[in-house]
Amino acid sequence: MNLTQIKLLIELNKTSLNLSLASQNLHIVQSAGSRQLKLLEDELGFPLFVRHSKKLVSFTMAGEQVLEQAKIICMAQKNIRTISEAIKEPDKGCIRLGTTHTQARYILPHVLSIFKRNHPKTKFHIEESFPENLYNMLRKDIIDIAICSEVLSNKEELEAIRGYQWSHLLVAPQTHPVWKTDLSLKSLLEFPILSYRKGFSHSDKVSHALKRIDPTFEFEIVASDADVIKTYVRRGFGIGIIAQMALEENDKPLLKSHFLSEELSHSTTYCAYLKKRILAPYQQAFVDSFLSVEL
């Protein structure tokens, strides 16, 4: 058993058992990757994969157990490298950051501008996705740190630290008739409502609250991007419900807003990483910078 074989298992898990891509990621040819898998299975004495012809279909039950141990080995290697690099150059490195569009668009620019003043050698790779996928990206070591909402707080293998709280906002043009109502959720149902699609910015919380009043409720338009929602609201397609940080100063001349914190409970943003991971000093400094955010 060697480290190349261990890393190949990890890459196969990341690439959905694509041996060609996994081998390419390790800078070996596919035939060499196939040979390494056979050598490992011969040494262990049992198959690691379910195969259809020569195609890898899934990990066997025993293969899943071996994969979990391979993850521990690779994480230990990464942690050792982190310790070494922290001693040599504590401020130099790259943070693979996973987050939602809302965080990347409205919160992170301010955080990064402050952080980079003190850590100019730190680079960032930012991956945008929805919360559940960010969790999977952490598990597969595609990202180092994830920033999003509560979905990260109940995962046992994650260190999830509470960040800032935020509320949903009602937005509509200044002259829209919604502003003549009592602004209760029931009154909002008189108008077409635009908001986030499922999995983004607690759209489920909004949808469930409205369906408790009207079980047949459906959003008029859904999008993953608040800029898209605001554009269609300005064009007269309906009223919008967005995260409060998505309303910017240049929106205010055209869009009036109202906090829905009484109708919809506050949401919390979390910063999360794998518990077994050792953060480099610059990574920990970034986490601390993000956790200092207040709205």
Image (cartoon, helix red, strand yellow):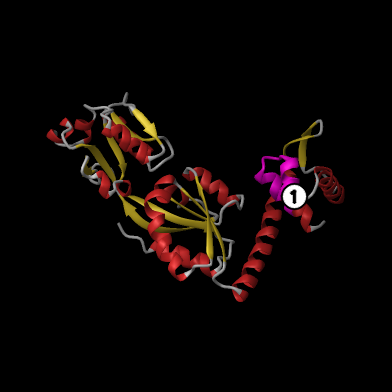
Residue 69: name its quadrant. Answer: bottom right
Residue 231: name its quadrant. Answer: top left
The x, y position of residue 78, in whole percent, is: 65, 62
The x, y position of residue 62, in whole percent, is: 74, 45
Residues 187 and 209: in front is 187
Q: Residues within 10 Å of mark 1 (few under 14, many from 20)?
A: many
Q: Magenta segment: does it hold 18?
A: yes
Q: Residue at x 31, y 30 (%)?
A: 211
Give left or right: position of 139 versus 67: left
**Element assignment for label 1:** helix
**Residue 259 seen from this side:** yes
Give the residues drawn in magenta, as a range.
7-26
Q: Residue at x 58, y 62 (%)?
A: 277
205 to 146, vertically: above or below? above
Q: For mark 1, what is the residue?
A: 8
Mark 1: amino acid: Leu
Give left or right: position of 191 versus 58: left
Residues 43 and 13: in front is 13
**Residue 208 seen from this side:** no
Q: Which image quadrant: the C terminus?
A: bottom left
174 to 74, vertically: above or below? above
Q: Magenta segment: does it hold 21?
A: yes
The x, y position of residue 241, in whole percent, is: 29, 38
- How many numbered markers are drawn? 1
270 to 83, vertically: above or below? above
